[in-house]
Amino acid sequence: RALWHDPSRILATRDAHSAHIFLGRVIKNPALGAHVKRLEGVVDMFTCVPALSLDHDHPVAFTNWAFTLLQHCPHVIGLSVWPDPEAGWLGQLEHLPRLRHLTVQARDLAVYFDVDIYSCFDFLAGVSAVRLDSLTLRDYYGPRGDTRWAVHLPVTRLELDRYGPHLWANLGIFLGDVRNMTLRPHSYVWDPETLLPPALEAFALLPPTRTDSNEYLIWGPEEWGELFAEPRRFTDLRVVVLANVEIDFPAFEQLCAAAPTLERVDLRHGLWQEYTCPEGTCPDASCPGASCPDAFKDVRLVEALSTLPELRFLHLGKFLRGGDAILDTRVYCHLFGVELEWRERFLPRLLSSGRNVVEADAF
């Protein structure tokens, strides 16, 4: 029954002896290997179980172990590999006809040579010949300098995890076929030249799966809002998830204007900034240049939402005054069948079409 999950993730928390015992059992009983569907923790095993390798520069023992295991697990659908075209990983992929998801994870930069950066790029060129539904690039270092051509990735789902967003121009990959994209930058530094594929149907901006520091990454509205700034437009975009972001009205309005077909907007881990009216623009004469009254912000929010006729779910994130600050927005969502959620001092509330407001435990 344990094989229904991912045995490699369990082995990554143990020692080399456990890994060899598992391989021995699979060799003796081929029926066990036929049940293994996911080996997405294989690369983590090299990191967590260094005894599997002879040294960090050329993990012969590790690759031998992994290749032997793959030969006895022909039905694998998810796998993680090193981006080394000379180690034989590409040949192994060709013998996995059911493989649909691949994670390409680079070695730690501390033990990376310059040649490895180009090897990673060359490896992706070989991966393009493998039939995949989704691809994750973790710790990906694109080729240095400008490239005259880009690797075509024939996948519809792409995740970039722990990549440097300031290196976007040097990614060296063609994203024209990508419909579902997840970005997990490892830095708050943002490249204004970051361009999302125009045919996107779903997009998520999430924190990296692992960070080397205690720094809590938060992207401001100037950074993530640039992704949707004019003249960029996404007429097929249906779902947007933004985590660890600060939100203001200009950025939110840019998002609504750039993706008028949105059906689901999830900002549950976002925090709205206090809005300050430009002097002379606030309808409340008592607060020129001060914090804008809730009523004015509420009206502006409704105006932005009215440009999304297909919207069915909206999580606004955290408001300092919660639901009391968005009374008009709550009414609008109720009338137009939009399921609305928000957070108020870590106490979420829910207002759904045809239902009353209910309070729930913290997420």
Image (cartoon, grey):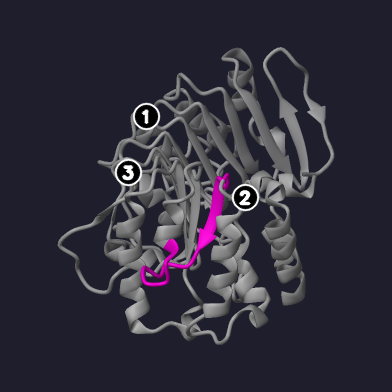
The magenta stretch spans residue 84:
yes
Residue 248 is at least partly visible in this image? no
Residue 85 is at least partly visible in this image? yes
What residue is rendered at 36% in x and 55% in y?
Answer: 127
Could you say where residue 115 lies in the image, as x and y percent from the top left? 32, 80
Residue assigned mark 1: 236
What residue is rendered at 42% in x and 71% in y?
Answer: 87
> Which span of residues is magenta-colored?
75-89
What residue is rendered at 64% in x and 24% in y?
Answer: 339
The mark that comes first in sequence, 1 or 3, is 3
Q: Nearer the viewer, residue 49 or 26?
A: 26
Compute the Cα span from label 2 to label 3.
29 Å
Inspect the image, locate mark 3, and give the three-letter code of the amino acid beneath it: Pro
Q: Quadrant of the C terminus?
A: top right
Q: Residues within 10 Å of mark 3 (few under 14, many from 20)?
A: some
In the image: residue 98, left or right of residue 253: right
Residue assigned mark 2: 38
Q: State the SS at label 1.
A: loop
Residue 33 vertical placement versus 253 (above, below): below
The mark that comes first in sequence, 2 or 1, is 2
Q: State the SS at label 2.
A: strand
